[in-house]
Every structure is written in C-alpha cells, then in structure tokens.
Image (cartoon, rainbow, N blue to C red):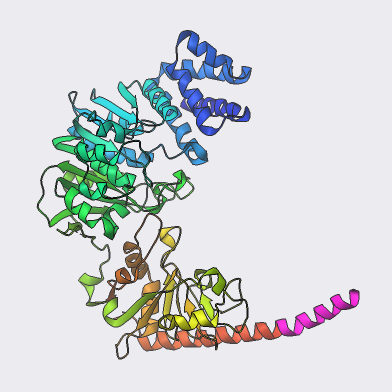
Amino acid sequence: MDLIAVRRRFGRIHDELRNAGKNPIEAVELIANLFVATGDERERLLQELSPRASHEAALVIQEASAAAGNGAIAFQELLVSESRNGLGQYLTPLPVAQLIAQVVTPHVDDNTLVLDPFCGSGLLLEEIGRGNNARLLGIEINGSVATIAEAFAKLSNRTYRVHRADAFWVWSAGEVPQADICVTNPPFGALATVAKHADLREAGAAPELIRMDAIPSELLGLDLAVASLKEGGIVAIVLPQSVLTNRSWRSYRTRIFSKLRLDAVVSLPEETFAPFKGVAKSCLLVGHREAVTLPHSVPYFRSASVGYDNTGRPSSSPSDLPDIGTAILSGATLSLARLDPDGTIAFPSTLTIESRRATVALGDVAHVFRGKNPPRDDFFEEADAPWLLKVGDLEGSFVSWRERPRCHVRPQFFERNIALHLAAGDICLTGSAHRPSYIGLKVDLLDELPDVGAMPSGEVLTIRLRPGVSVDPVELLFYLRSAEGYGQIQELVRGSTGHLYPRDLSTLRLPVESGFDRGEVTKLYWEAAAAFRSYLALESAAKARALPRHEDEVASAG
C-alpha cells in the first residue's frame, strides 16, 4: 500500500467533511465509523458523504484494510493533525507513547492485562500491543473518541476493548480490573466525573484527595492507576509536573510514593504538549506497586527534545526519548531525585557548577521578593505618579521607563507598599508567564529609577543584594543571564504554566567566583548604561523638536 496516498485520501475525506459543516471531532468520528461499520451500516455512512468523499472513502477503506499497520499509521497522523485543530487533547504525543512502550513492553507477554483508564484514541494501547498478544483494555468517557479508538484498533489489527464510561465512576463502583500494567495519560485540570466523594473513598481513594472539595483529575488519575495494579504491577503515567512540585500536595505524595516505587521520572520539554493545547510542564512517571520507605532516590532524566517544536513541526534536534528509554531499561542512575518523608521532591541539577567551584545560595546574599498588582482603581494615568514595573518593561538589556498603558499607580497605593519600593541596583526578572521558558528569559539590573519612584508588578521578582556581601550586582546580573543561570532558574519553575516563587529562587546556587574579570565587566556595563541613557535623552530631544512643528502643520491645515 502507498502510505503517502492513503494519508492524502484521509486528508481529502476530512476536508470534505469539514467543508460540509462538521466540526473536527465529528469529521474524524465519521471517518472512524467508516472503518468500524460493515455491510449496510457502512453503505449508509458512505451515502452521507459527498460523491467525491464517498469515492475517496471507498478507496481508502480498501487500501487501508489491505495493510492494516500502515492504515493505522495514516489514521494516527490524521489524529495528530486534528488534535491541534480542535479535536481536543485525546492523544498522548507519539514520541511519549513510544517511550512508554519502549520501557513497558519487555514486561509484556500473552497473559498480561494492560489497562489504560483514560485511553482517548487508543494510541498507548496501540503502541503497547505491537508484536504481542497482550490483553488490552481501555476506558474512555467520550463516546466519539471511543469510536475513534475502536477504529484505530481495527486499522492496526489489534484486539482491544474500549469500555465507554467514566473511569472514576467505574473505579468507585469497584469495576476496574486488577491489571499487570497500567499506562495512561489522565486528563489535566478540573475534575469532571459523576463519581461521588463517598464512593471514591470506599474505592480506596487517598484521604488527602477526599478532603478536597474539587479533586484535581491528575491526582485522582494517579491514585486510580496505582489502585488498579496488582502487587508488583507496573505503571507508566504522564502527568503535569506540578504533581511533583505543588507544595500543598506534599502529604498526598508521601502516601502515594510510599506504595509506588518509582523506577524513573522523565521531565518532558515544554513543547511536548504545546501542539495539543495542553500543559507546558509535564513528566512521565514509571514505577512498580510495592511498599517503599522514604526517603527514596529515583533515577531522573530531563528530555531536551521530543523531535518537534512548539507548533508541532519537526525540529532540528531529534527526539532524545529513545536514548532515555534505553537508559531506564539499563538501570542507569546518572542523576537522582530524592523523595523525602514529608513529600518534598528534591530534583538534581543538570549544572556542573557545584563540581567545578564553590557556590553560595542566592538567599544567603540577597533578599528576593515578588511585586504586587494594584486594584483597578489604583492604576493612575498621571505621568508624575509612581511607576509600576511590568514584565513588558523588562528588555534583557536596560529598562527605559518609557510611558505605556497602565504603568503608573496612585501615590497612596505606592506608599502602602513601601517594602516593595525598587532601588537602583535591584535585579528584576519575570516571575510568572504563560510558558515556563519565558521565566528568567529577561533579567535586568535597574541602573536608574524615575524620580517619582517605582515598584514591581505581581509578575516580577526582584533580587536585592544584602549590604556588605562580596557579590557585585553586575556579576550577579550576567550570571543570571548566562545559560547556566537560566538553566537553574528553569529548574525552579513550578506549575502547569510558569511560576517562580521567591523562596525557590532563593535556593539558586551562585558560584563564589564568577570566572571573568569582574572589574572589566563592571566597567563596560556602566559605560553601556551611560550610553543607553544618553541615547534616550537624544531621542527625546529629537522628538520634542519634531513634534511641535508637526502639530503646527496640522493646526494650519485645519
């Protein structure tokens, strides 16, 4: 079968259906139904298509059925494409699915029961089922997506059953079978289930979760996955990295990781879920269900590339996940995270500064604080009012203090927050952003402040060196701007999007010796600062001379 031709046929059918007014999921579901249906039902579905689409469908059904594996690949690529266009986050990204299969399938034989309680389109079950006769079971709450999974199974010539139900309700009803292996990517975000807290408690959900008014689905999904395993069973689960970093979930982590022995944690790069409109910071946990005494060390891996960029296009760097999979299988322990009894997880640094030279914690030499956003009524448009330094003011160079919308606050608000007043020599950086990679990307030293004073917004963190320390502010600035400094900052980012907290930034390690000529660098920096201020003054003078003439011309023309 010509795989490229089949891909094109799938695309043309889908385009015809979209042009006929169907939304992305309706179009994919109808294509899926064409492969699940037989006889009169298939003929009925073909008649719903335009003559052109019906002809394409008949050909692609014939060609895909002749070579099931390639047909599945072509259909899978359609799913990947449409998941970016509104189908929804029903796919585990293919490179991640392949990594999970790589580390799990050595433990699979014909008697193995593999469960995916949030199977979506069935991609994980498809990857796990290659080359074996394992028993494969998926649970999927969305009927349309379950149809897609069934079509996927038919195309790939796999035998797996998709149970159309709410996995949390199935669990609370005691109907989730004990599996040898659980592979899954549960929904991230708010909980959507008909299961009641009391029923979940009876099913064995952790008390820490039952006490929550709204249980995060990622935590409940992890709980379900572990509960569904036989003793010694294997889990491979994709989760937001906040599951490992959120401080309010520490007691839950103590409980879950006392009965789940983690074999590996893989931190996935930001672009992993970007094409699928998912969370930015995600990870893969691989482990066995067995009792664990904390503290416990876990092999920890950081992926630098999944093979595509933030738009889903192939990147210049190939995926490093196959190499990580090989390292996990070999038992490599080059880098270890530590699970402490209080539920705190200490992640290893990828940086080498500690092995090369002495370091000091940033909090030992500096005070770190977050700014504050004023209420709507406390923004002020008068140019002589105090400034609010916002993320957009940071340039990774010098702060120009140019007028922009909502850049001033009322004097009363400014005086109420005297502890947040900025001073020359402070270093400011982004503390919150929609994407984690933006955190720490722009770091500025305040060489000059407006006469009326300034304070940082709630999205800006400020570092103020303590009196008498030997660290020079310019030296600190350039370390934070370095690849090493930015890398450390990125390791401290929390949350599904991007948040950096003062107490975390305070743990950043600074080299005691900078490695460059401090005096020469400092001299050059302040010369650059003076040149920048001179440029701004000259530009303002030019503008002042030009605009009055322009305004006079406009008045004369009127």
Foreground pick, 552 / 97: 552
Q: Residue at x 41, y 86 (%)?
A: 522
Q: Position of residue 64 (x, y in %)?
A: 44, 20
- In this view, the residue in front, 234 or 422, is 422
Viewer can see residue 225: yes
The range drawn in magenta is: 543-558
Displayed quadrant of residue 118:
top left
Image position of 439 (left or right of 220):
right
Where is residue 119, by image quadrant?
A: top left
> Is residue 130 at least partly visible in the picture?
no
* Residue 152 in the image, given as x and y percentages of width and height: 39, 25
Instruction: Locate residue 367: give its quadrant.
Output: bottom left
The vertical placement of 322 against 480, above or below, is: above
Location of the C terminus by quadrant is bottom right
Q: Is residue 16 above or below residue 213?
A: above
Q: Residue at x 65, y 86 (%)?
A: 538
Q: Position of residue 173 (x, y in %)?
A: 25, 30
- Can residue 45 be found in the magenta stretch? no
Foreground residue among 341 and 409:
409
Q: Which quadrant of the rendered structure holds the N terminus?
A: top left
Q: Nearer the viewer, residue 530 or 318?
A: 530
Our reading of the magenta stretch's main secondary structure is helix
Tell me if residue 435 comes above or below residue 465 in the rendering: above
Left or right, 158 with respect to 427, comes to: left
In reply to whether residue 557 is colored magenta, the answer given is yes
